Image (tube, grey):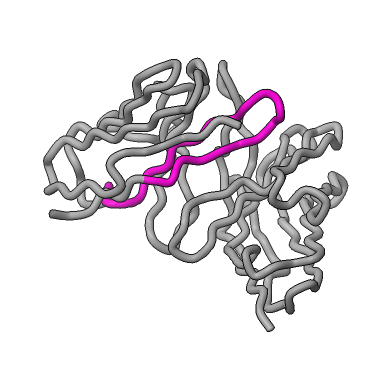
């Protein structure tokens, strides 16, 4: 089973700063990785899929990169609404299991 | 507009059963794989089950043999039958739609969730 780890657990930044979040897979997942944003009391929202493609309606300040085992979500300039928890996700082919990372909380410094 | 609305959550005793429902609208339900994902209070996301368009089902080890996912395309509805419930199953349960990129499968639309509490 592939395990995803995320770092840091918490990232304290100010609006306008750049956020860099990491997700590492225990074995190669090629480009099969997504990023989600979740705000308190809300369902998660798909931000990035296939490691680097923005989902529909996602602002250009969100970008994803990486392949294999190391992935990065970058928020180029934090807006007030970007303070949230971010999860990465992948699916193994056999057994067919979907897994999420433990999350990174981006909070206001 | 795509909408997913879960229902059926509530308080149940350990060892008990509960059936969750998800009403889908705004898309051709029968053409999409569907999922259940849960989240315990203050914790991360955990995928619980998936069902394909052909009715094929998938589960993680934590719920396999206890939970059953099903769908009724004529009613645009997704279900999760949960048996032998444990305290560790306490969570908000989300219904989610599958989205396929070039490389893999993700979750592009989510419901608002329904809370399941397992306690005596």
Judged left or right of residue B44, residue B74 is right
Q: Along the line of sight, which residue is nearer the eye, B88 or B6?
A: B88
Q: Residue at x 71, y 29 (%)?
A: A95
**Residue B104 figure quarter:** top right
Residue A80: tell me if it is visible: yes
Q: Residue at x 59, y 61 (%)?
A: B113
User: Is A63 inside the magenta-drawn segment?
Assistant: no
Judged left or right of residue A79, residue B11 is right
> Could you tell me how many numbered marks the image carries?
0
Image position of A90 with respect to B101: above or below = below
Q: Residue at x 20, y 32 (%)?
A: A76
User: Is A95 inside the magenta-drawn segment?
Assistant: yes
Q: Residue at x 37, y 35 (%)?
A: A58
Q: Residue B106 placed where, x, y %?
A: 57, 33
Viewport quadrant of the C terminus of chain A: bottom left
Viewport quadrant of the N terminus of chain A: top right
Residue B25: tell me if it is visible: no
Q: Along the line of sight, which residue is nearer the eye, B9 or B45?
A: B45
Q: Residue B32 placed where, x, y %?
A: 72, 35
**Residue B53 figure quarter:** top right
In the image, the segment drawn in magenta is A82-103
Q: Which residue occupies the extreme bottom position in the image?
A: B120
Image position of A26 with respect to B22: above or below = above
Q: Along the line of sight, which residue is nearer the eye, A27 or A96?
A: A27
Judged left or right of residue A83, residue A33 is right
Q: Residue B102 placed where, x, y %?
A: 56, 16
């Amino acid at each position: 089973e592939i395990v995803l780890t995320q770092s840091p657990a918490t990232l304290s930044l100010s609006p306008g700063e750049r956020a860099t979040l990491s997700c590492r897979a225990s074995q190669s997942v090629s480009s099969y990785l997504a990023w989600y944003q979740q705000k308190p009391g809300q369902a998660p929202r798909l931000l990035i899929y296939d490691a680097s493609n923005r989902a529909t309606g996602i602002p250009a300040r969100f970008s994803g990169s990486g392949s294999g085992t190391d992935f990065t979500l970058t928020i180029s300039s934090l807006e007030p609404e970007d303070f949230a928890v971010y999860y990465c996700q992948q699916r193994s082919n056999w057994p067919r299991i979907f897994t999420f990372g433990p999350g990174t909380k981006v909070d206001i410094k | 507009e795509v909408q997913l609305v879960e229902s059926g959550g509530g308080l149940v005793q350990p060892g008990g059963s509960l059936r969750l429902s998800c009403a889908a609208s705004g898309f051709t339900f029968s053409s999409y794989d569907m999922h259940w994902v849960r989240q315990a209070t203050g914790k991360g996301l955990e995928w619980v089950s998936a069902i394909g368009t052909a009715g094929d089902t998938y589960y993680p080890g934590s719920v396999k043999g206890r939970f059953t996912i099903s769908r009724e395309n004529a009613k645009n509805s997704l279900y999760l039958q949960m048996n032998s419930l444990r305290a560790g199953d306490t969570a908000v349960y989300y219904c989610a739609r599958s989205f396929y990129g070039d490389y893999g499968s993700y979750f592009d639309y989510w419901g608002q969730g329904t809370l399941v509490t397992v306690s005596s």
